[in-house]
């Protein structure tokens, strides 16, 4: 079944430029399949077009490798998108610069390390180095998560207090692991912004805690964030406190390689 649009997206209110409607519908089809549409009816409904037009577009997208299809249905994203996705990932300097640093961090501390950016008002994971102990994290590269429910999302928001309340409000209907109130969220964000470090206290996934820090570019803007995640037994309060300096210095190391020369955490 096709899923509802993810929080933070506003595709329905963005009108395509004149003369680009067909292209826009094709992109809507790709996005619909990426969100779970597997048959022509779901694709046509998501793209807002008739079945015959959707069928023609799907046929072309299959021919060009942007979609896969089994017996004219069971649509899934195709190999061309995988190839383009890797190109997009590695055309950004952040994942390339951060990769060896994150691998060493995960090796040394044995816990899962993530790298994420903000995209369409959501967390978008662009790298993950699995830990070697405890339960496996359900996160994956390319997955999206709420900003206000994840430590890495909170780290991405540290410099924008004007967005904290609206972000929490827009994401509050999302099923969450804890009953975090807006008041407690805003209080925590104020404290995290002062420290330059953010925490996930099982806000997103039961039993999972993490410590996160922002990555800045040469202009000082937050362009990404990193986090270290583990299950409760491996992430007690004392260890989280100790990891703040580790994650802060690691994020600062990556930031310096991106040209940032400001303070370290």
Image (tube, rainbow, N blue to C red):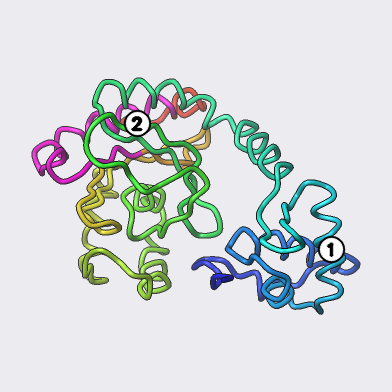
Q: Position of residue 17 (x, y in %)?
A: 83, 67
The residue shown at (25%, 48%) is 199
- Asked if residue 8 is positioned above or below residue 262 in the image, the reply reads below
What crowding class fits label 1: few (fewer than 14 Cα within 10 Å), some (14-19), or many (20 or more)? Answer: some
The residue closer to the viewer here, 252 or 17, is 17
Q: Position of residue 147 (x, y in %)?
A: 40, 57
Give the image quarter of residue 26.
Answer: bottom right
Query: Which quadrant does the N terminus fall into?
Result: bottom right
Q: Position of residue 96 (x, y in %)?
A: 54, 26
Queried whether the magenta region covers residue 86, the answer comes back as no
The residue closer to the viewer here, 41 or 234, is 41
Queried whether the magenta region covers residue 240, the answer comes back as yes
Give the image quarter of residue 164.
Answer: bottom left
Disc 1 element = helix
Residue at numbered disc 2: 263
The residue shown at (79%, 77%) is 49
- Asked if residue 3 is positioned above or below residue 33 in the image, the reply reads below
Is most of the magenta stretch helix, strand or loop? helix
Q: Residue furthest front?
A: 71
The residue closer to the viewer here, 216 or 181, is 181
Q: Residue furthest left?
A: 238
Residue at numbered disc 1: 57
Which span is picked out in magenta? 227-254
Q: Are marks 1 and 2 in contact (CB under 8 Å)?
A: no
Disc 2 element = loop
Count of residue discs: 2
Instruction: Give the label, 1 or 2, closer to the camera.
Output: 1
Q: Position of residue 165 (x, y in %)?
A: 36, 69
The residue shown at (40%, 69%) is 171
């Amino acid at each position: 079944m096709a899923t509802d649009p993810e929080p933070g997206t506003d595709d329905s209110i963005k009108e395509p430029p004149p003369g680009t409607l067909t292209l826009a519908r094709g992109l809507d089809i790709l996005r619909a399949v990426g969100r779970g549409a597997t048959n022509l009816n779901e694709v046509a409904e998501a793209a807002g077009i008739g079945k015959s037009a959707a069928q023609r577009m799907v046929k072309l997208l299959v021919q060009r490798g942007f979609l896969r299809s089994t017996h004219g249905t069971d649509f899934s994203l195709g190999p061309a998108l995988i190839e383009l996705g890797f190109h997009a990932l590695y055309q950004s300097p952040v994942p390339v610069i951060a990769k060896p640093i994150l691998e060493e961090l995960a090796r040394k501390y044995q816990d899962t390390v993530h790298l994420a950016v903000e995209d369409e008002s959501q967390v978008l994971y662009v790298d993950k180095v699995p830990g070697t102990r405890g339960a496996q994290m359900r996160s994956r590269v390319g997955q999206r998560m709420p900003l206000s429910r994840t430590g890495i999302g909170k780290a991405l928001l540290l410099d924008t207090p004007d967005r904290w309340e609206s972000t929490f409000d827009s994401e509050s209907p999302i099923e969450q692991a804890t009953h975090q109130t807006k008041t407690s969220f805003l209080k925590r964000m104020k404290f995290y912004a002062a420290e330059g470090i953010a925490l996930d206290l099982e806000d997103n996934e039961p039993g999972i805690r993490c410590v996160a820090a922002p990555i800045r570019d040469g202009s000082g803007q937050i362009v990404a964030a990193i986090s270290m995640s583990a299950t409760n037994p491996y992430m007690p309060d004392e260890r989280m406190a100790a990891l703040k300096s580790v994650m802060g210095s690691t994020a600062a190391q990556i930031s310096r390689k991106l040209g940032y020369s400001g303070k370290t955490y």
